Image (tube, rainbow, N blue to C red):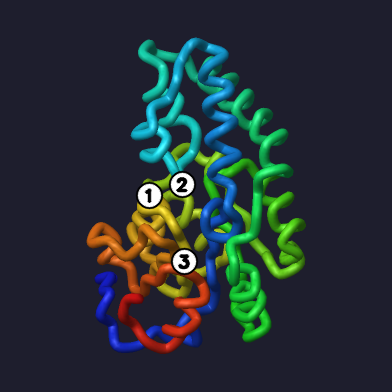
């Protein structure tokens, strides 16, 4: 598959499934995760830089923790710190999580047109389920893959390969909605057509994506066309 931003048409009818990322794609949750990371890091005497926090948007906690700490951690120590950050996120998310405008509506539209819907996220499964309930789309999602349960997370292709396997599909029969570069790279490397949505997605580093737009509203305007807004 050769991703191209200048493909003349994008037709959802070519695909059997749509796979959505969660954080930043369906819900705005990064402020909650950032607060959780900072609060736990400060407990251990560390203050994450802006650059480190930004570099790990859309990724799991393992690499973030390894880069934050200036000493090697055992798998048990890393897991314990990750659990603390997840628990902190449990407190922040209900207060700070908000829907991304138009995302849930598009998910429902695609489902109603007969597409199978899956979630591929770096978040723990409980956070995914809570967000889907908040959005009112849990009954439309048939498959959930949490990279926290896998040996490698985004930008590695494993999360999306696992999602395609769970759906029983070849990756080329699914398209992925992503807002972050690690997530988009993960989906592309796995062989899915990538639709990137968000203010940052129009930069040249996202040029491999099949379609790009600033928002889901703009994306809907490109339903059968490519190009950039």
Task: List x then y, in percent, for residue 198.
Answer: 43, 62
Residue at x 73%, y 50% (from the top left corner):
130
- 134 and 78: which is toward the camera: 134
Q: Which residue is mark 2?
A: 58
Q: Which residue is mark 1?
A: 182
User: In what element is the residue under mark 3?
Assistant: strand
- 132 and 172: which is toward the camera: 132
User: In what element is the residue under mark 2?
Assistant: loop
Which quadrant of the view contains residue 125?
A: top right
Task: List x then y, in percent, for residue 149.
Answer: 57, 40
User: In what element is the residue under mark 1?
Assistant: helix
Contact flag, marks 1 and 3 (Cβ < 8 Å): no
Of callouts 3 and 2, which one flags the residue occurring earlier in the amino acid sequence?
A: 2
Which quadrant does the C terminus fall into? bottom left
Q: CA distance from mark 3 to mark 2?
A: 14 Å
For the residue carrying disc 3, how many other residues have a C-alpha within 10 Å: few (<14), some (14-19), or many (20+)?
Answer: many
Contact flag, marks 1 and 2 (Cβ < 8 Å): yes
Task: List x then y, in percent, for residue 52.
Answer: 37, 32
Res 66 visible: yes
Q: Which residue is mark 3?
A: 176
- 188 and 8: which is toward the camera: 8
Answer with left or right where residue 81 lies relative to residue 132.
Answer: left
Task: List x then y, in percent, for residue 97.
Answer: 65, 49
Answer with left or right where residue 33 lies relative to residue 172.
Answer: right
Q: Nearer the viewer, mark 3 or mark 2?
A: 2
Of callouts 1 and 2, which one flags the residue occurring earlier in the amino acid sequence?
A: 2
Residue at x 54%, y 44% (from the top left corner):
30
């Amino acid at each position: 598959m050769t991703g191209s931003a200048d493909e003349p048409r994008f037709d959802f009818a070519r695909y059997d499934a749509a796979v959505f990322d969660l954080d930043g794609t369906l819900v705005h949750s990064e402020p909650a995760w950032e607060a959780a990371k900072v609060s736990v890091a400060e407990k251990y005497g560390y203050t994450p830089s802006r650059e480190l926090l930004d570099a790990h948007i859309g990724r799991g906690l393992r690499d973030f923790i390894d880069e934050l700490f200036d000493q090697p951690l055992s798998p048990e120590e890393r897991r314990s710190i990750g659990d603390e950050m997840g628990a902190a996120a449990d407190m922040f998310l209900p207060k700070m999580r908000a829907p991304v405008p138009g995302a849930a509506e598009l998910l429902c539209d695609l489902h109603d047109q007969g597409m199978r819907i899956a979630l591929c996220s770096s978040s723990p499964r409980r956070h995914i389920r809570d967000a889907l309930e908040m959005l009112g789309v849990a009954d439309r999602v048939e498959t959930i893959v949490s990279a926290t349960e896998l040996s490698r997370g985004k930008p590695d292709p494993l999360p999306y390969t696992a999602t395609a396997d769970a759906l029983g599909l070849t990756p080329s029969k699914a398209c992925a909605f992503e807002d972050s570069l690690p997530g988009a790279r993960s989906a592309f490397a796995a062989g899915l057509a990538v639709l990137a949505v968000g203010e940052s997605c129009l930069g040249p580093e996202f040029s491999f994506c099949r379609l790009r737009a600033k928002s889901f509203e703009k994306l809907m305007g490109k339903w059968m066309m490519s190009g950039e807004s």
